[in-house]
């Protein structure tokens, strides 16, 4: 409605020129240079009417008969218009239609005073496109620059005479970029009154502002009935916060806080904290089995929380920092709260979207906390990492924490680059790390107790690439890895408290590869091309056997495995090229654009162990095959498998396929097999009943235990002015029903 005022203010100035109609001119143009420069902002206006007049005594301008005023993105149409220059009153009647940009107003008559910015509209409809909202009223009163009252009116986001939904009331108050309020309101489902409420509030905003967001409702076996109501606080232009209030009938009230800030394109941060005083614990008896998980130990704590943070910060002089924190109260928390406004899935998706970094999986009980400071040059990079891995189980149960911490790790690396003009290339990986382990590690994997100390690695590699007949590439390389340890609390066979030791190891690599390709033209009359590439590769790797029994052990990097192996692989790629539909305004002499798409990618590989003892006495490894097929734009197939040539059976087999049709139906099937570990099948189907109705189902089963791990069914309805999602999910841990209703323009409510 603020838009409506601005339109009418401009129109008022334009109406001054209607006096030209008294001379008999039926159409004319007015340029901004002739009137108020600030109001018209260099817009050229065009006004037409069947006739016009000016009363010099009353200072009254009149135009009538198919009046049209146009300028820029603004247009006013009416049968009759009056403007009083003295009082600044404007009146328009008869099929009044006002449009500017994307918003519009239609009414029987409009009467406004441009000085006080007040007035009224008779039988009017205001449409705000950003909110997709219609406001109807027998009489709409403009009470201020941004405020309006409507009597005997209703609001809706549905067009047409009969709306799917509307909220009617005798008294409606609206503030643009604020809220609307209605007293004694009735919610209608088409022509049926569905709900009465003495008071209702709704947002009328297109900008970020403080206020309530859409709530979510739901019920489940573990939580009971619940509501999750967020409140958004727009603190400043670059900071905001959201408070989440989540009462659960079975568990208590969970409170969440999210704080966000943006300093510039490279500096931003998001902090989230959830707190819950849980009514339920797992006391180890059958009575509380509904509040435990088979995959984790017994949970006895009632004070539960989850703190997570991600931040990026420019430090100056080319340095930047990244901070990640993830601390949970117990191993069950993320399994318990995987969904919801502040659940694991929404949090992970938010972090990936905003920071391009994820978080540890919900079932991981060792959470990563890290501060990284880095600087990147054209061919070199420097990273300083402080990592702390929080073992939730050890902390909660007060048991030995054998988690290895690295505080800090400093690495300096260089990418592949030439060594002068010698034809030799080199790359360098180097790192200095301080390790710390709180408690004794298992004797089966280490010889140390409460190990702490430094490890320095320096690993250069030299390459000498050769090319023969433009077909064959041979790349020999040699690497040298030097490692120095300075370790405290080191208990070896000599029972030394502190020691400095070192190790030097070398290795050689030889890689031979080629690339064969051919381009096919399916139709000589078209520009469609299909390129088939074959990339055969043979690699040889040799690392001598080194005695490392008396060396410290922090992690797997402290042991260099003997290697004497030949690996072959063949990659097949199919790439299609199709012309892109030309634009409506092609550039002169521009070449026809093309789109390229990988239709198939297949890799077959196997290794031969020259020393068969490196592979448990077997000379050959499993045959591995990875593939991706995009057979058509509606059919895709992915697979990865490993086949034992000795047992003649699969060790792993993962196959997945998705098929879609033009209507929007789709079917996804995934089969996962890991020998002696697991075997499962996953199916998801989406059926588009009509353009507005879709149903879907998910079925996942563990074929080893013959236990169904998930069954879900759902219905989605999408109308032009509202949508509805219904879903029921049954898993091994919980059963829940959810719904989410969105009234376009007002927001939504329900659970997902």
Image: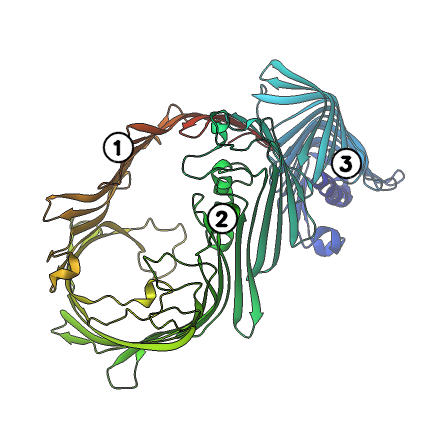
Foreground pick, 235 / 244: 244
Q: CA distance from mark 2 to mark 3?
A: 54 Å
Residue 647 visible, this orientation: yes
Percent x, y of residue 117: 81, 39
Q: Quadrant of residue 255?
A: top right
Q: Nearer the viewer, mark 2 or mark 3?
A: 2
The secondary element bearing badge 2 is classed as helix
The colour scheme used here is: rainbow
Q: CA distance from mark 2 to mark 1?
A: 30 Å
In this picture, residue 634 sits left or right of residue 409: left
State the quadrant of the N terminus. top right
Query: Sequence-wise, which precedes: disc 2 or disc 1?
Result: 2
Percent x, y of residue 367: 47, 51
Q: Residues within 10 Å of mark 1 (few under 14, many from 20)?
A: few
Foreground pick, 331 / 28: 331
Q: Are marks 2 and 1 in contact (CB under 8 Å)?
A: no
Percent x, y of residue 241: 65, 47
The residue at the far bottom in this view is 421
The secondary element bearing badge 1 is classed as loop
Which residue is under mark 1? Answer: 704
Q: In the drawing, what numbered circle is on residue 147?
A: 3
Q: Are marks 2 and 3 in contact (CB under 8 Å)?
A: no
Q: In the drawing, what numbered circle is on residue 392?
A: 2
The secondary element bearing badge 3 is classed as strand
Q: Nearer the viewer, mark 3 or mark 1?
A: 1
Query: Sequence-wise, which precedes: disc 2 or disc 3?
Result: 3
Residue 207 visible, this orientation: no
The residue at the far front in this view is 494
């Amino acid at each position: 409605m603020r838009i409506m005022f601005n339109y009418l203010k401009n129109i008022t100035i334009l109406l001054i020129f209607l006096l030209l109609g008294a001379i008999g001119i039926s159409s004319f143009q007015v340029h901004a240079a002739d009137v108020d420069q600030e109001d018209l902002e260099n817009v050229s206006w065009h006004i037409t009417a069947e006739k016009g007049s000016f009363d010099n005594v009353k200072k009254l301008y009149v135009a009538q008969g198919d009046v049209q005023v146009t300028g820029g993105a603004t247009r006013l149409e009416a049968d009759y218009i009056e403007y009083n220059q003295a009082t600044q009153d404007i009146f328009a009647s008869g099929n009044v239609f006002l449009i500017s940009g994307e918003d519009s107003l239609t009414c029987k008559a409009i009467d406004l005073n441009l000085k006080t910015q007040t007035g009224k509209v008779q039988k009017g409809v205001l449409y705000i496109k950003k909110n997709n909202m219609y406001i109807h009223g027998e009489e709409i009163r403009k009470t201020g620059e941004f405020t309006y009252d409507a009597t005997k009116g209703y609001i809706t986001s549905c067009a047409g005479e009969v709306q799917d939904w509307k909220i009617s009331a005798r008294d409606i108050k609206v503030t643009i970029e604020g809220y609307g309020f209605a007293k004694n309101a009735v919610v209608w489902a088409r022509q049926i009154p569905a709900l009465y409420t003495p008071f209702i509030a709704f947002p009328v905003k297109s900008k970020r502002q403080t206020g309530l967001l859409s709530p979510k409702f739901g019920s489940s076996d573990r939580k009971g009935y619940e509501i999750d109501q967020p409140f958004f606080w727009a603190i400043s232009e670059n900071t905001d916060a959201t408070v989440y209030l989540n009462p659960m009938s079975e568990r208590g009230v969970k409170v969440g806080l999210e704080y966000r800030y943006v300093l510039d394109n490279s500096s931003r941060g998001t902090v989230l904290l959830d707190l819950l005083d849980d009514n339920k614990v797992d006391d180890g008896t059958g009575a509380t089995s509904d509040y435990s998980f088979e995959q984790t130990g017994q949970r006895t704590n009632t004070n539960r929380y989850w703190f997570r943070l991600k931040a990026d910060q420019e430090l100056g002089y080319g340095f930047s920092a990244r901070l990640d924190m993830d601390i949970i109260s117990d191993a069950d928390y993320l399994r318990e709260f995987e969904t919801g406004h502040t659940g694991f899935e929404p949090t992970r998706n938010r972090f990936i979207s905003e920071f391009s970094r994820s978080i540890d999986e919900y079932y991981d009980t060792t959470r990563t906390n890290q501060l990284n400071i880095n600087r990147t040059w054209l061919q070199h990079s420097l990273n300083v990492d402080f990592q702390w891995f929080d073992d939730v189980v050890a902390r909660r149960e007060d048991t030995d924490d054998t988690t290895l911490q690295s505080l800090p790790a400093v690495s300096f690396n260089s990418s592949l680059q030439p060594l002068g003009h010698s034809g030799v290339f080199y790359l360098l990986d180097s790192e200095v790390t301080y390790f710390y382990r709180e408690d004794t590690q298992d004797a089966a994997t280490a010889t140390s107790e409460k190990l702490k100390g430094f490890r320095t690695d320096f690993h250069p590699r030299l390459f000498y690439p050769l090319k023969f007949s433009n077909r064959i590439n041979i790349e020999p390389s040699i690497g040298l890895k030097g490692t120095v340890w300075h370790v405290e609390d080191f208990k070896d066979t000599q029972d030394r408290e502190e020691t400095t030791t070192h190790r030097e190891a070398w290795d050689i690599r030889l890689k031979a590869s080629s690339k064969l390709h051919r381009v096919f033209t399916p139709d000589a009359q078209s520009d469609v091309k299909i390129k088939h590439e074959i990339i055969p590769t043979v690699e040889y790797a040799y690392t001598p056997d080194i005695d490392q029994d008396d060396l410290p052990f922090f992690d797997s990097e402290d042991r260099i495995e003997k290697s004497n192996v030949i690996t072959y692989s063949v990659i097949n790629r199919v790439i299609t090229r199709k012309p892109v539909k030309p634009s409506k305004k092609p550039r002169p002499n521009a070449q026809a654009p093309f789109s390229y798409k990988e239709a198939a990618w297949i890799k077959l590989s196997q290794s031969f162990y020259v020393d068969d003892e490196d592979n448990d006495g077997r000379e050959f490894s499993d045959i591995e095959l990875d593939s991706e097929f995009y057979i058509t734009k509606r059919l895709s197939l992915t697979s990865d498998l490993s086949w034992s040539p000795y047992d003649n059976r699969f060790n792993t087999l993962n196959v997945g396929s998705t098929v879609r049709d033009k209507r929007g139906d789709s079917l996804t099937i995934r089969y996962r097999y890991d020998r002696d570990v697991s075997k499962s099948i996953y199916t998801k189907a989406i059926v588009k009943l009509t353009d507005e109705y879709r149903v879907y189902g998910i079925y996942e089963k563990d074929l080893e235990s013959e236990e169904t791990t998930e069954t879900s069914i759902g219905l989605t309805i999408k109308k032009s002015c509202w949508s509805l999602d219904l879903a029921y999910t049954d898993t091994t841990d919980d059963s829940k029903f959810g719904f989410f209703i969105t009234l376009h323009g007002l927001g939504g409510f329900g659970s997902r």
